[in-house]
Amino acid sequence: MALLRCRILHINTQHINKSRIFSELDEIEDRKTDIENYLYKTLIKRDAASMKIVFYDLTDSYFEGKKCDLTSPGITKSNGFRKKIVHSLLVNSKIYPFAWDILEDYTADVNTIKDLSTQWKT
């Protein structure tokens, strides 16, 4: 991740306060569209060919706690029945991320692609 910050955002990772990032997650989520647009435009500008083919990944994770509004009870891919959360990620052909989502319900990859493709086009 540090290499990614250096290459895309030109940020010296020595100046990053990880605990501050965690305290700013709400603001990051509020600016998600702006961040995704910036990453997309930056990647197009730097290497348009890398955006001709993009890759999509859908995965899940789980929480042990009881008070996460983003999770729902369900069976995760690798850890059985848990409070799970589903993540989607879009990366270019050089594996730089530029869009992500947290999905409320787990569905097959093909269904999420149909639902999210309109959003990605905009």
Image (spheres, rainbow, N blue to C red):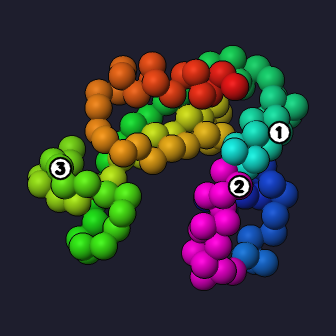
Quadrant of the image containing the C terminus = top right
- Disc 2: CA contacts within 10 A as few (<14), some (14-19) or many (>=20): few
* Observer able to see residue 93: no
User: SS at mark 1?
Assistant: helix
Q: Quadrant of residue 117?
A: top right
* Residue in the picture at 40% in, 43% down: 103
Q: CA distance from mark 2 to mark 1?
A: 16 Å
* Residue in the picture at 34% in, 67% down: 68
Residues shaded magenta = 17-32
Q: Which numbered dot is residue 31?
A: 2
The answer to which of marks 3 and 2 sits earlier in the sequence is 2
Rendered view: 50 above or below 76: above
Name the amino acid type tagged 3.
Answer: Gly
Name the amino acid type tagged 1.
Answer: Thr
The answer to which of marks 1 and 3 sits earlier in the sequence is 1
Name the amino acid type tagged 2.
Answer: Arg
Q: Is residue 65 left or right of residue 31?
A: left
* Residue in the picture at 66% in, 22% down: 121
Rendered view: 94 above or below 103: above
Q: CA distance from mark 1 to mark 3?
A: 37 Å
- Disc 1: CA contacts within 10 A as few (<14), some (14-19) or many (>=20): some
User: SS at mark 3?
Assistant: strand
* Residue under numbered circle 3: 74
Q: Is residue 94 left or right of residue 63?
A: right
**Badge count:** 3
Residue 112 in the image: state x and y as whole percent.
Answer: 40, 28
Q: Which numbered dot is residue 42?
A: 1
Q: Quadrant of residue 64?
A: bottom left
